[in-house]
Amino acid sequence: METYKQKTDRVMRILDKWPAIDRQKAVSTREFIARRKKVWDAISRPPYKVDVGVAFCDEHYSGDVPYLFGNTNVAIEQVAGAVGPSDLGRSGIIAGFEGIYVAGQLAGRGGTNVYATQSLQLADEIYPVEGFTLKDILNRIAGKKVRRIGLLTPRQVLPAGILANLEQVAGGSRNVIDAQVPFQKVKNLKSRREMELLRDASVGTALMVRAMLAVLEPGMLESEVAAYGEFAGKLWGLERYGFPTIVNSDEANVTMIGPCLNRPILPRAFVNIGASGKRDGLTACCRRSVLAVKSDRQTTSYQAFWRDLVERGFVIGFDSYVDIARNDRPACIQEQSLVDYFNSRTADALAAVEREHGTKWRKKLQARLTCKSDLPPGLARLKPYTGTHNAGYTECQEFYGAITLESESPLDAQVVTMLDVALRGRGNGWDDVAIPGFDYWVVEDTLGKFGHKVENFTGFYNERGKETPEPGKLPTRVQGLVLNAD
């Protein structure tokens, strides 16, 4: 196996020729102020008519507060924020006694205030800092006694203690209402600067994947492969990540989104590689699957079948996305195209399983794909998730904008989307084998929609239906990039 130095030298050659960015580019103070005003205008009108809107985040759900207030450096402590009447200028970040300093670092560029409260400090710490009650802070932001609070963050991620505190402030649970939808609609529509930063984040994310491909070989630990991606990304200009770097090999592919572990990569194993770099808080994503082989000649026909099936699915999904964007068609058409495609390949999949593993396994898979279920019969039952989701200040936790079969409206004018086309080989649990010898294969790229135009931020495949090489992007099939720097 190669030495660390040999691998590092190869990564440095890639890094030296990768497109550079302006690392100081950021969202302006004016834009943060405008975001808060848009949100306030939306939630202060009927049917919401709230006195104040409250957002929450932590390192794991890191989208809402950074979007409104610019503190993209959330760390360790929970952080909240509240939006009130724009003319008062009192909206701000609400943090614990360490969080006030972390938030304060970037609060100036967010054009916002920082309020300290014991309610959000680390549970078992004592600090020599004076703070205010959450009630006092919200009353100040609202400019009056708060009687009606709008939750901007979904209840699914809001801690029970904070929710109880808010209900006490407002005089009962009936006075704390869900106001996520108007907030999410504002957040979904991306500005010109957001799209620029998302494009930059995508170039850096593609670099991370490229670096990991350049060093991957059997015998390495998953964590060693991931280390080279993170090394290259930080050197290039990425500050944080939307999710822990993914390197899943052999049966670890069952996790689909699991972080790398100290597990050796076995020869000829399927490997799922994923990266999610951030620029000024805005998140991109790129994922590819490969085989742990030194030459594609070592790929078996069975492995090639599943690879080709999913990669063709990505093309179908991308072309359909271009169609709904270009013609303002209902977004659900794109998800339906993926379902229809996978179902159209059911017979091919059954035949491949029978050739490789015999009639018994074909019958088991056929029974799974045709048994009584809420899902239509076919291979799409093993499509692991909706193929297209929204992004922004999180990689996939926007709670709004994913394309499902219920998405009857066209996409918004300017958005970023993750096209994530995959197939899984397991059923309802870790040990529930559906497709023998196959656990998971994925192709995922970050797409930018500009009116009726679509740009693939991370991949070669484009709206012209062609695989056109571009600096800072990757081909759909990346097997040829394994263990080389060309």
Image (spheres, rainbow, N blue to C red):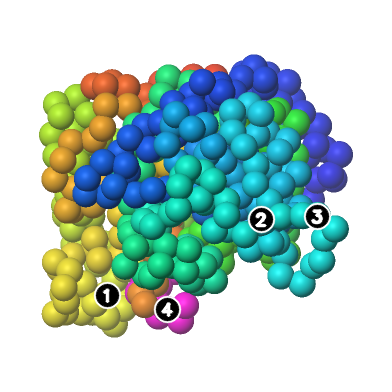
Residue 109's place in the image compared with 241, above or below, is above
- Residue at image mark 2: 132
Q: Which residue is mark 3?
A: 129
* Residue 408 picture location, percent across and down: 14, 45
Task: Say the numbered circle drawn on residue 429.
Answer: 4
Q: Is residue 80 above or below residue 451?
A: below
Q: Is residue 456 left or right of residue 185?
A: right
Which type of secondary structure does the marked residue at label 4 adopt?
Answer: loop
Residue numbers of the magenta segment: 429-437
The image shows residue 430 at horizontal and vertical percentages of 47, 77
Which tag, 4 or 1, sits closer to the chain's start? 1
User: Which amino acid type is shown beneath numbered disc 2?
Assistant: Phe
What amino acid is found at the position of numbered circle 1 in the picture?
A: Leu
Above or below 423: residue 141: above
Image position of 306 (left or right of 160): left
Give the residue at the far front of this rendering: 144
Question: Residue 229 location, x and y as percent?
Answer: 68, 41
- At 62% across and 59% down in the image, what residue appears? 133
Q: CA distance from mark 3 to mark 2?
A: 10 Å
CB atoms of marks 2 and 1 within 8 Å: no
Label 4 neighbour load within 10 Å: few <14, some 14-19, many 20+: few
Would you say the residues marked 1 and 3 are in contact, meaning their CB atoms lie under 8 Å apart?
Answer: no
Q: Which residue is nearer to you in this view: 418 or 463?
A: 418
Which mark is in front, 1 or 3?
A: 3
**Residue 98 shows in this picture:** yes
Crowding near the residue tagged with mark 3, few <14, some 14–19, many ≥20 C-alpha atoms within 10 Å: few
